[in-house]
């Protein structure tokens, strides 16, 4: 069967589909690899340091524990 270029040779393999498939496999593999590495990094990350509490927050925490702040009679 002749196409627009006049070529009548048909070897049965479509090179464009093969190239696109190979590129998609490589990109998919790279994305999968980076996702796995991200998951490992999150699992092995050190604990985040706690933020310092403000004066009001300290007073509120002490009240929750039942300790009365000084000067509060």
Image: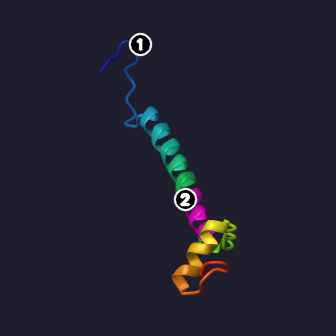
Q: Who is closer to the viewer here, 67 or 73? A: 73
The magenta stretch is: 33-42
Report x, y in % for residue 52. 70, 68
Label of residue 13 in the image: none
What is the x, y in percent for residue 1?
29, 21
Position above or below: 11 against 54: above
Residue at far left of view: 1
Magenta part, dominant SS: helix
> Which residue matches tag 2?
35
SS category of the residue bearing label 2: helix
- 10 Å neighbourhood of mark 2: few (<14), some, or many (≥20)? few
Front residue of this view, candidates 2 and 57: 57
The disc placed on residue 5 is 1
> Is 6 placed above or below 30 here?
above
Element type at mark 1:
loop
Give the quadrant of residue 72.
bottom right
Q: Residue at x 41, y 37 (%)?
A: 13
Mark 1 Cα shell of 10 Å, populated few (<14), some (14-19), many (≥20): few
Closest to the observer, 2 or 19 = 19
Tell me which numbered mark, 2 or 1, is placed earlier along the sequence.
Answer: 1
Please tell me which residue is depicted at 50% across the width and 50% down the height of the picture: 28
Residue 47 pos. (x, y %): 66, 73
View extreme (front): residue: 73
> For residue 68, which quarter of the picture?
bottom right
Q: From the image, state whether disc 2 or disc 1 is nearer to you.
A: 2
Q: Where the C terminus falls, by quadrant?
A: bottom right
Horizontal side of 10 relative to 57 (left or right) equals left
């Amino acid at each position: 069967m002749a196409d627009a270029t006049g070529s009548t040779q048909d070897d049965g393999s479509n090179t464009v589909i093969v190239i696109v498939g190979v590129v998609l496999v490589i990109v998919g593999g790279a994305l999968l690899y980076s996702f796995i590495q991200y998951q490992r990094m999150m699992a092995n990350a050190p604990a985040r340091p706690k933020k310092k509490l403000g004066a009001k927050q300290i007073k509120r925490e002490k009240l929750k524990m039942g300790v009365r702040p000084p000067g509060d009679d």
